[in-house]
Amino acid sequence: MKMMKQLLSQSGRTVCLAIVLSLCSAAAGITIVGGVNQVLESGISDMGQTLLYYLGLVALLFCAGVWSQILLVGLGHKLVYRLRSDLVKRILNTPLVKQESLGAPALYNVLTRDVTMVANAIKQLPISLYNGLLLIVGLVYLAWLSPLLFGFLVVTAGLAVWGDMLLAGRIKSMMQDVRRLDDDLFRQYEAVVEGRNELGLSRARRQFQFEQRFEPTAKLARDTSIKAEVLWAVNLNWTTLLVFILIGLVFAAGTLFDSVSQEALVGYVLAIMFLRTPIAMILDAIPAVIRGNVALSAIEHLDLGQHLQNVVDASTSETKLAPFQELTLRQAEYHYPNQGGESGFQLGPIDFTAKAGELIFLIGGNGSGKSTLAKLLTGLYLPKRGEVTLNECLLNSKNAEQHRDYFGAIFPNFFLFDDVLDEEGNLGNPRVQYYLKRLAIDNKVSVENGRLSTKALSQGQRKRLALLLLHMEDCQVLLLDEWAADQDPLFREVFYREILPELKQAGKTVIAISHDDKYFDAADRLYKLDQGQIRPYVVGRDSLFDESYEHVTQVVERV
Ligand SMILES: Nc1ncnc2c1ncn2[C@@H]1O[C@H](COP(=O)(O)OP(=O)(O)OP(=O)(O)O)[C@@H](O)[C@H]1O
């Protein structure tokens, strides 16, 4: 609720005006009811004046009501917009390591389901506020009409509200269970969508995934939701019934107590009947409000980065980057958190230097820590111990964004964007056509108005496009994580013998993670990672294999 209060406080004036207008409209409605009661009791003395009075009240009821609804509908949509953009900003400002630990399904769940739930709850805002105020004004009228009957009404209705609140608490905990199940469901959706090839080919896995993984969670979510909503529907009917019970009780009290006038009795019946609809509408909105509340606390409890005013650091975005000179790691360490009793992977301590214009290869076996080191070099991860400096500037959480500005990277799980940007971050780049040809994909993709015409390409072609997008942005240091792994032999030759030297010639610093020993001679320097430790690698002198690869070495020797 903290976030919603903050958002609402930013629109304080609109909320106040909407409340005043709703009050006027509600007061007009109750005055009409009171007037009808009076007319029933004492007849009409001046027809013209009564009609005028009546029309004035109807006009006030309508105009103030519509105006307040317009304000509240606009406010509701503004709140949803702000919630969405704050959420996306917070995700963009969340460090990679935190995003990785949350996982994509949790983030998608928040961005889609939770935001929709909050939006649905906010949609109830205008109607609930109006009806709530109508109810309050109605209760004030009833208290004025007969304090004795009002006391009676308060006790009976109070008991009903207390029951409603208990039930609402029970429903909230059920909906929290459903919310937890939804996180699991989103993981199942991810498996269904991302694992489409594997699931398409394996009947057993498809059946297991559906019957053992998806279905039990979906069924439990279904059953819990049904239980919660049926409980509330029964409550809704019971509350409607309560209105009639109240009317009966009011009559009974009226006959018991002589002090209650006939006028007050009729007034009570009329007002209670009039207030039936607002009561039902408020009760109807409660499940959506509870769901929105559960979703909002899920959003707030997601451990995301702090919301910043801008998605880029305004203090550094305008300043032009100084030319890259040197990147240095001194006894730098990074370690992943322990998971399920297993201790997390430890990288380092590492000493490493890359100078401007160098072409450096990082090699090493699977899981030796190459990608982790790449993330440490680029500032996506911050060192847990030791130092990372760029142009002698020590990397820390405050200047990480500026550090990252020097780098462009293609990781194995890269995302291919639709838009071609230039070095200033503007859409489109006049050099793009030349490089489409250079990367031999001009027959497959074109760029119109800065957008790629298609992304339906092979993995190797997609990687060439990713390299093209990176090159257009003109980063000073390029980090290519096994970029050539998906290229055909011919283009691999082009990459190592032409593209990398051209990049070097253009003054770029390139750090490439590679398994292609055939091209190790293309590098200025080579480093080998072995179980998180780094050392220089000399072609012809050092072995490609680690101690942990002993049995593999024997296989190779046999071959
Ligand atoms: N997000 C993560 N959370 C926890 N542990 C991780 C994470 N990413 C990688 N690891 C662990 O860190 C170790 C090194 O992983 P890394 O991806 O750096 O290896 P790599 O040398 O790039 O391997 P490959 O050649 O297979 O790509 C692995 O043992 C892996 O289990």
Image (spheres, rainbow, N blue to C red):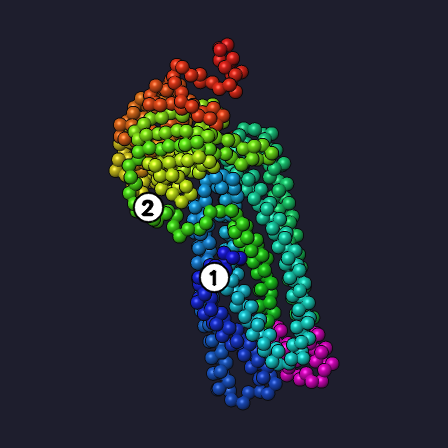
Give the residue number, with chain letter if any, for mark 1. 8
Residue sitting at 33 percent across and 36 percent down?
391
Residue type, label 1: Leu
Residue sitting at 47 percent across and 79 percent down?
56
Tell which of 301 and 264 is nearer to you. 301
Cβ–Cβ below 8 Å for labels 2 and 1? Answer: no
Report if residue 279 is visible in the image: yes
Q: CA distance from mark 2 to mark 1?
A: 31 Å
Residue sitting at 45 percent across and 70 percent down?
17
Picture coordinates of residue 385 (x, y %)? Answer: 46, 36
Q: Secondary structure at mark 1?
A: helix
Give the residue number, with chain letter if any, for mark 2. 317
Vertical side of 444 occupied by 497: above or below: above
Query: Which stretch appears magenta?
Result: 247-273
Specify few, some or many for label 2: CA neighbours under 10 Å numbering under 14, 14-19, or 20 or more: few
Vertical side of 396 occupied by 70: above or below: below
